[in-house]
Image (tube, helix red, strand yellow):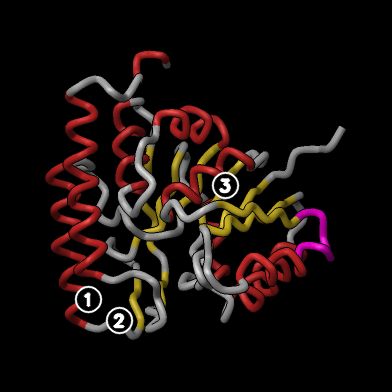
Amino acid sequence: MLVAPYLSIIIPAYNEESRIIDSLIEVTTYLDSQEYRWEVIVVNDGSSDCTVDISRRFAQKDPRIIVVDLPHRGKGGALKEGFSVARGKFMFMCDADLSMPLAFLPCFLPPLAPKADIVVGSREIKGAQRYDEPKVRHIMGRVFNWLVRLLAVRGIKDTQCGFKCFSAEAAQKLIPLQRLNGFGFDAEMLFLASKLDLPVVEIPIDWHYNPDSKVRPIRDSLRTTLDLLNIRWSFLTGRYKINQF
């Protein structure tokens, strides 16, 4: 019987052929320096380039690397599948561009992490640092975060940062309830966590803007705003089966 890993890192990937190999090398090199058992799950979200082939070739070298190939669903759909496959005691979602230095990873895990079921990397709270981000993009992000707090998730200043860590128990409660496949996935997950009274804490991180990011602020903010309205509607109409817990 395989021993479950301590940490699962879930990387959603959409058309990442130009950087997925470098990211996997960096992630696995870091993890090899740690004493705990680990696994890395790359979820290919229907890429039209060679992301899945490159990832599979890399994974052939190490059984701790798992590649899941999906038709295109959206980042949320890819993450949902990754969480479903993950076996770790802790599950860490991680953007493929590694815009947060891996040196911050211990802050998401015991004993350094605050005691909580969900630890959220934040670019907005005191102590966080943003590097090279265009001012317009930052302002748009602040406005959007305000909208998220208004419509769905209160008390969290940065719901959309792609670096979050979940206890396995929290993920097992949240994933079956999730309905969204797009960028609204993060807000939905934190909204559901609040309804299940799961403790959530934000920690400050360094975050480096990547000009090749797949995020398109105007387009994705509009789509995610629709997702926020969908979250409220689904809650009000009882589509989230929260009472089962």
The residue at 81%/38% (across/down) is: 3
Q: How many marks?
A: 3
The crowding category of the residue bearing disc 3, from other C-alpha atoms within 10 Å (few below 14, some 14 to 19, many at least 20), is many
Q: Which element is circle 1 on?
A: helix
Camera-nearest residue between 11 and 194: 11
Decide if residue 187 is on the left or right side of residue 230.
Answer: right
Residue 228's place in the image compared with 41, above or below, is above
The residue at 71%/52% (across/down) is: 39
Foreground disc of the pair 2, 3: 3
Direction top: furthest residue: 244
Q: Magenta span covers which residues?
A: 59-64
* Label 1 close to label 2 by CB (< 8 Å): yes
Decide if residue 55 is on the left or right side of residue 100.
Answer: right
Amino acid bearing label 3: Gly
Residue bearing mark 3: 82
Residue bearing mark 2: 133
Q: Position of residue 96 (x, y in %)?
A: 53, 67
The residue at 46%/73% (across/down) is: 99
**Mark before the other along the chain sequence, 1 or 3:** 3
Q: Principal SS element in the magenta part? A: loop
Residue 115's place in the image compared with 135, above or below, is above
